Image: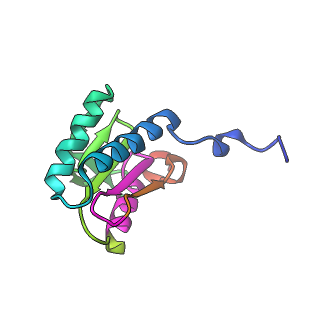
Amino acid sequence: MNTNKNTKYHELLHRELSYEVQGAAIAVRKHYGPGHKESLYQRAYAEELQHRNIRFEREKSISIYSKRKTVVGSYQPDFIIDDKVIVEVKALESLPRKMLDQLFDYLRNSKYELGYLINFASPKLFIKRVIYTNDRKGFING
């Protein structure tokens, strides 16, 4: 194994927070199962985050930037956790690809680098981790 590689890319982005985000989702799904509405999962997830003493905001407006560094719009994700992670909560039997694409676009055009798409109603709990680092964003580094 080459130990001279840049360790930045070998470490999990927001490691401990990522474990908590996923652990909270697992706890909610374990307790409630797959058959509820999205609003119930959102409230239950918020309660679980509070129980874990994780700082979060619900439906906080975030700025969406153009490549010219101007704000061209905003978006209100379900959760912003510790001002580092976007979390979108869904309750669908299956997720259309556009929902994952949407999360990717929010990361690509905002200051956030890490996002989760969590679907509580799929046959198995679905947790998708998406990364788009700021070193790839022209409005931050251009």
Q: Which residues are magenta?
A: 99-123
| Magenta stretch encompasses residue 120 | yes
Q: Nearer the viewer, residue 53 or 29?
A: 29
Q: Nearer the viewer, residue 59 or 135?
A: 59
Q: From this viewpoint, which residue is outermost toward the right?
A: 1
Above or below residue 122? Residue 11 is above
What residue sits 39% from the left and 54% below the top? 107
What residue sits 30% from the left and 41% below the top? 80
Q: Quadrant of residue 97?
A: bottom left
Apparent side of residue 49 relative to residue 67 in the rendered image (left or right): left
Q: Is residue 46 visible?
A: yes
Q: Nearer the viewer, residue 48 or 104?
A: 48
Apparent side of residue 83 relative to residue 39 in the rendered image (left or right): right
Q: From this viewpoint, which residue is outermost toward the top?
A: 53
Q: Position of residue 55 (x, y in %)?
A: 30, 29
Above or below residue 125? Residue 83 is above
What residue sits 50% from the left and 37% below the top? 14
Q: Position of residue 140 (x, y in %)?
A: 45, 46
Q: Position of residue 132 (x, y in %)?
A: 48, 54
| Magenta stretch encompasses residue 88 | no
Apparent side of residue 45 relative to residue 133 in the rendered image (left or right): left
Q: Position of residue 20 (x, y in %)?
A: 41, 36
Above or below residue 6? Residue 94 is below
What residue sits 37% from the left and 65% below the top? 100
